[in-house]
Each structure stands twice: as C-alpha cells, then as structure tokens.
Amino acid sequence: MCHYRKSRSLEHHHHQQRLDFLLQLYKEKALNGDQHQELVDLLARPENQDRASLWLDEVWAETPDKQFFSAAKSDQLHQLVLSQIDRPQPKVRRLNKTIISTVAAAAVVTIVLSYLLIHQSDFGNSDTAIPTKKNTSAFIPDIGPGGSKATLKMANNRVIVLDQFKKGVVLSAGNLLVKNNEEGQLIFEVNQAAQNHAALSGDNVLTTPAGGQYEVLLADGSRVWLNASSSLKFPSSFTGRERNVELTGEGYFEISKSKDQPFIVNAREMKVEVLGTHFNINAYPDEQLLATTLIEGSVKLSHRSNSVLLKPHEQASIKNGSFKIQKHIDIKDVLAWKEGYFLFDNEEIHSVMRKLSRWYNVKVEYEDPQVNEEFIGKISKFKNISEILKLLQATGTIKFKVLPSQDPRYERRVVVMK
C-alpha cells in the first residue's frame, strides 16, 4: 500500500517536472509536434486544471493583440467547444474575439489549449508570421502609420500643403482668415474687420492623401473630419439659401444649427440634407457600398426618386443601385476610423486591404483574386503595417509579402497569398 502511494507520488512529481520543461519550451517557441501533443495531454489532466487555467491567463495577458482570428476559425473553435459540453447553449465569454467556454471541463481545456498552441506555433513560424534573421523580406522595410496630412486648394487657386504649413500662422485672403492651429485643425473664419475686401468666389478643396486625415472648421462653425484618400469641396463662406459641400471618400460631420440655411452634402449619387446634426458618410469611389449613418439629430436623404428621414443609429445605404435602411447600427463600429482603430466584423479580405491601402499608401495585389477570407478584430491604426499584417497572417489563413513599389504613387506593394 505504501509502495503504491510512493509510486503515485513519484509519478506525479515526474509529470510536474515534465510539465515545467514543456512549458519552458513553449515560452521559447521550441516545441516540436510530439511535445506539443504531450503538453496538451498534461495540461488537460484533472489534477492540472488549475495550472492550465493560470497558464492560459498568462498567454492572453502576454499577447494582447495576437488574438486576431478569422471569422471561420472563431466559429470553428466555438463549435468544437459547444460539441464537448452537455448543454445545448452554454454561456460564453469573448476574449479579444476568441470564444472560450466558461465551463471548466477537461475536454474543453484540451480543445482550447490545442488551438492556442497550434496558433502560437503558426505565429512563431518564420514562413507565416514573425520574420527571423533568415527570412525578413516579408516585412522590411517597414511602413509607418498615417497622420495629419492634407492639401488645401483655395478658391484663388493657391495650394497649401497643410502638414508643412506652420502651426498658428494666419493666412488672409479677401475677407477670409485661414488658420492651422496647434491641434492640426484647419479653421476658416470670415474676417469681420475686413468688410471692404471682396469675398473669395468659388470653392476650396481640402484633400487628404493615402495615409492622411484632417479636421476642418468651416466658416459657419461646422466641423468635418476627413478620412484618408478623401476630399471636401466647400465655399469660403455660406451666403445662399443653402450650405452646399461635396464629399468624396469618407467624412464625419458635426453641423452647426441654422433653421433658415440647411446644410447639404453631395456624395456620389446620395444627397444628405441637415439643419444641425452629427453623421458619417462613407462614399469611396472604390467601394460598392455608399452609406450615411446618423449619430444624433435627423437628416433627410435623397437618391433618385427615393427620400427618407433618418433617425439616430440608423444607416441608409446604396449598393448596386439598391436603396436600403438599417436600424440599430453600432456607432462605435462606424466611427472606429475617427477614434484611431481598424475594426473588422466578419470583413472580407479585399475590404480589409482597401482600408490598409488608404492608410499606409500601399498598392495591394493578389496571387489569387478569388481569395475570400473574412476577419474579426480591432487594432490601433497607429501601428506599423508589419504589425497589422502579422496579426492577419497569424490566423493561418493568409500570407503577405511586402515588396518595393514600381508605381511612384505608392510606398510599397503588398502581395496577398494563400
């Protein structure tokens, strides 16, 4: 009897030593296939459940941005977990878009640990994720994030590169004052002290390049934020019965109230009329979807013979000539670009890459144009492009190469591969 207990104790001690050794190999990313399976088996043993949970917490804590799975992989993991639990629909919690069951069953731990270890192995593989000294061509040279960049073509045809225009400088043109303040905001003001000067006729055009964003305060007090590769055409001051502007690309508007002078945004084939409200318009020429989302207030939209009055958290969109209204829109998703994030919600790879192309000024090419992976995740726009591509690539569903650009308009070429 004593001999049996001693043997069990020695066996347990041996298992713990072996577990320590394998966990150290995991940290060093040195596990081979057999060791990977052995680690999963040990962590799934009932006596190691507490340690497995602690280890799992450490993994997530140490890699906060790497849980960036494709929609297919998230669903696959979810279904595997559900299939191992004796309840048809257990409660789950989402951890950076990876679904983990709250039920502490050994089978569930085995599935999740297996998935994580395989995922970690993929991420550490020099052919898929992190470049090594032997293979760094995929992500070097790196490309930094965009910033406050724009050009202003004034009504008198003067062109100003705003990121080179000294902060705090005041430019006088007719009865107009143009300022570029310390926060990178362009301000238009009618100079009340210059009533004898004629107002500039014609429109100004504010244009953001790929990799640029900018904010402008119009002469009526309305504020507009332009996303990358966008433009806003507007007059120096609003003098008629309407305040008309024209948007290409994407912009967020906070319109000052004026009952007698509605504010009208013309964006492709959509016309948005407001008196005073907050809304976002996505009208990129290379996107099939043209959408206006109302944050607060009300707007009237017109498209051909269709006309609709939007309420807050509603979105009107046009795709392939079809007009559609959606309710209960998540505003955080719509305004992620303005708040400094890429937010992908079951987003197809071509759409993802168009966003990256605009922000990092890269030309995107596809080895297989039919690739149609979808992604879920949220990540800061202020990371270098290599970090974004590593996160996408870590899903194991897609690969990238960054090459010199043969087109002088772009920083680099990004090749998408399966």
Image (cartoon, rainbow, N blue to C red):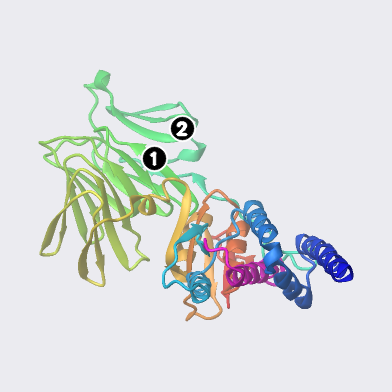
Q: Which image quarter holds the C terminus?
A: bottom right
Q: Where is residue 169 in the image (x, y as percent from the top left)?
A: 45, 26
Q: Left or right: 252 with respect to 403?
A: left
Magenta segment, principal secondary structure?
helix
Identify which residue is drawn at 22% across, 21% down.
Answer: 196
Identify which residue is drawn at 53% across, 63% down.
Answer: 103
Q: Where is residue 355 in the image (x, y as percent from the top left)?
A: 46, 60
Magenta span: 101-129
Mark identifier at residue 215: 1
Mark 2 is surrounded, within 10 Å at the Cα level, by few (under 14), some (14 to 19) or many (20 or more) other residues, namely few
Q: Is residue 234 visible?
A: yes
Mark identifier at residue 183: 2
Q: Can residue 400 be seen in this view?
A: no
The kind of residue tagged 2 is Glu
The kind of residue tagged 1 is Glu
Q: Does the magenta stretch include residue 121?
A: yes
